[in-house]
Amino acid sequence: MVKTLTFIVTKGPYSSEIPYTVLKLVKAARKKNVNINLFFYLDGTFISHHKQSPGDYPNVQYITHDLLKKGLLNPKIDAIACIKCTHARGITHGDDSFKEGSAYTYEGVIIGGLGDLAIWLKNSDKTILIS
């Protein structure tokens, strides 16, 4: 039986190594045939934001995109960005242009809420909060 691991990520890219560490853990877990849920919360919502320009740093958005493309097949990788957090940071707009369940960026991250996280937590074998 395939296990499911949920990561809750609250730190954004380029201010710490946390996003890179999470993505390395996701890659390693996927090699062990583990399904992954990524919940981007607070500044973690910047991880897959499509307007990054990090200069000399590795672009965490591209790394996330590559992992999500590979996760279309088993083992699965799904990602949700908190709707309130994206609105508060100007990533999405607090109007009708973004609704829960809508596409967030071309990486395959969707807009969701804490209700989605609750479902993931209930159905996961393990949860890791990285903050």
Image (tube, rainbow, N blue to C red):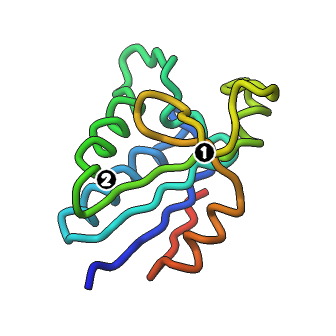
On the image, the x and y values in percent for residue 119 come to 60, 71
Relative to 11, residue 57 above or below: above
User: Element at badge 1?
Assistant: loop
Q: What residue type is labelled 1?
A: Gly
Which residue: 28% across, 50% down?
Answer: 72
Which residue: 54% across, 42% down?
Answer: 110
Relative to 58, residue 53 above or below: above
111 left or right of 37 in image: right
Residue situated in front as seen by the camera: 79 or 25:
79
Crowd tier of the residue under label 2, counting other residues whose Cα lies within 10 Å: few below 14, some 14–19, many 20 or above: some
Mark number for residue 24?
2
User: Element at badge 2?
Assistant: helix
Q: What residue type is labelled 2?
A: Lys
Q: How many marks?
A: 2
114 left or right of 80 in image: right
60 left or right of 27 in image: right
Label 2 vs 1, first from the N-terminus: 2
Q: Distance between the residues labelled 2 and 1?
A: 26 Å
Mark number for residue 35?
none
On the image, the x and y values in percent for residue 74 come to 22, 62
Q: Are marks 2 and 1 in contact (CB under 8 Å)?
A: no
Where, quadrant-wise, is the N terminus in this rendering?
bottom left
Q: Which of label 2 and label 1 is nearer to you?
A: 1
Relative to 46, residue 30 above or below: below
Q: What residue did someone put label 1 on?
A: 101
Which residue: 43% across, 28% down?
Answer: 106
Residue situated in front as seen by the camera: 16 or 91:
91
Q: Residue furthest left?
A: 31
Crowd tier of the residue under label 1, counting other residues whose Cα lies within 10 Å: few below 14, some 14–19, many 20 or above: some
Which residue: 70% across, 37% down?
Answer: 99
Residue situated in front as seen by the camera: 71 or 56:
71
On the image, the x and y values in percent for residue 42 come to 70, 45
